Image (spheres, grey):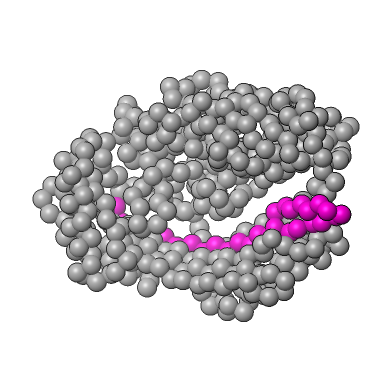
Amino acid sequence: MSGAELADLAHRVVDRASGDEEVEAFALRKVETEVEALRGEVDALSSAETRGVGVRVILDGRQGYASTAMVTDEALATALDEARSNAAVATPDEANVLPDPQTPPDVGDLTRPGFLDVPVDRKIQLALDLERAATAADPRVRGVDMAKYGDAYVEVALVSTRGVESAAARTDAWAFVLPLASQDDETQTGMGLTIGRAPGELDVDGAGREGAERAVRLLGATKPTSRKAAVVFDPHATAAFLGVLARALSAEAVLKGRSLFADRLGDHVAGEALTLVDDGLRPDGPATAPWDAEGVPHQTTVVIEHGVLRSLLHNTWTAHRSGDSTRSTGNASRGSFKSSPGVAPTNLHLSPGDADPSRILADAGDAVYVQEVVGLHSGANPISGDFSVGVTGLAVRGGELAEPFREATVASTIVEVLRSITAVGSDLRFFPFGGALGGSTVLVSEMAVSGR
């Protein structure tokens, strides 16, 4: 099914609109493959092609949604009728409107030729190579918890009675490994990751080595002494924290009373060194696309500028609900054609500084280096901003990485951590999770670290 055929599906829904109702149709086709390797063999292999249409109807401020994986005229008409029925019983809300058409930016070609022609054998080999690279990197790596290759071809089309008519396509490939490093009776794990637009852009050897190095260097870890110390977060750990921050910066969370950033626009919520940007136009961003899940153009949004909260992340509903002159920031997001638009970040990242990681370690002197955060979803409260989470990593002595530690806890508030960031490294790296999050090495001047 081509992009033109997807657009035709969407038109076959929207052309049935009647009266004063507003109708939007979101058509999607996704072709994906996943391969897991274990002990030199294929442990799991799946491939699937999904397609379908999501239908949104708005009438008198009442909004209804329905979807169908069938693309016959009868199924499309049924989905439209179901969306109308759902709208009829919904609570009216004047903020329920569809966006007007806008010209999307040019983000270049996000696909790679021949992506759908890559044979499964090649994908299997990449998963096997990934496992082999991890186990060959160090004799203490005795195996892997998981070595996984995945890819996806995604094509979408969106048409509405407002005049929005957009289509886009992208290809993505990724691989990650969780090596198991063992010594005596102890086992540690680390993660190696590589992403690209096509299988040939992946560095599976590098990902294998990265995962092995991160696992091996934790061997011999002990509980650290409880104290207050400077804390250095590596890019993996920083990206994990950004996931919590992103939830709190969603205008939807603010409007529903689920964010510590309510009524904080214009306030100093972070240190001078911190600028946070959501950029759906970055060429290297995993979530880059010309427009969001409502057809609103992606943009570069400075969320926090030198410590000052400048913007929240909006879709069309949150922008209208917020009133004044608030406009959507192009952060509407859908999990699939089966869901109506919510709000999610798009390549959210800290604006990189000019110091490399070694310089930040040197500046930290004696500190704690965090490479993994555990329990963020349950240990962080996006409303109060309080968090207490488990961490593993290494001590920093004299500006150099030293002995490993485990079973430690860092506790603070999100705002206090943001205000205590004194340096952001130049090593920005994106992780394809939660709307794509970009982490850098970050130095926090002081945090409470609990151990023994």
Decide: is 379 above or below 289.
above
Left or right: 429, with 27 as reference point? right
Q: Image quarter for residue 240?
A: top right
Quadrant for residue 232, please give it.
top right
Q: Residue at x 37, y 30 (%)?
A: 255
Can residue 81 be seen in this snapshot?
A: yes
- Judged from this view, the residue extending furthest toward the front is 185
Identify the main secondary structure in magenta: strand
Establish if 195 lies above or below 451.
below
Q: Inspect the magenta stretch and tell me whether residue 117 lies in it.
A: no
Start-end of magenta stretch: 164-192
Residue 425 visible: no
What residue appears at the point 77 percent right and 37 percent down from the top-left corner?
A: 369
Quarter of the image with the N terminus is bottom left
- Indicate yes or no whether the magenta region holds residue 183: yes
Residue ranking furthest to the right? 398
Depth check, front residue: 122 or 148: 148
- Residue 183, how many percent across, how many down? 85, 55
- Corner quadrant of residue 39: bottom right
Q: Position of residue 97 (x, y in %)?
A: 25, 42
Rendering coords of residue 435 (x, y %): 51, 48
Q: Give the residue furthest to the left.
A: 19
Q: Number of callouts in the render?
A: 0
The answer to whether 272 appears left or right of 169 in the picture is right
- Measured as percent of width and height from the top left, residue 15 is found at 18, 60
Q: Nearer the viewer, residue 52 or 44?
A: 44
Q: Which residue is rendered at x = 82% and y = 36% of the image?
A: 395
Q: Which residue corresponds to the image point at 65% horizontal and 59% vertical from the top-left?
A: 176
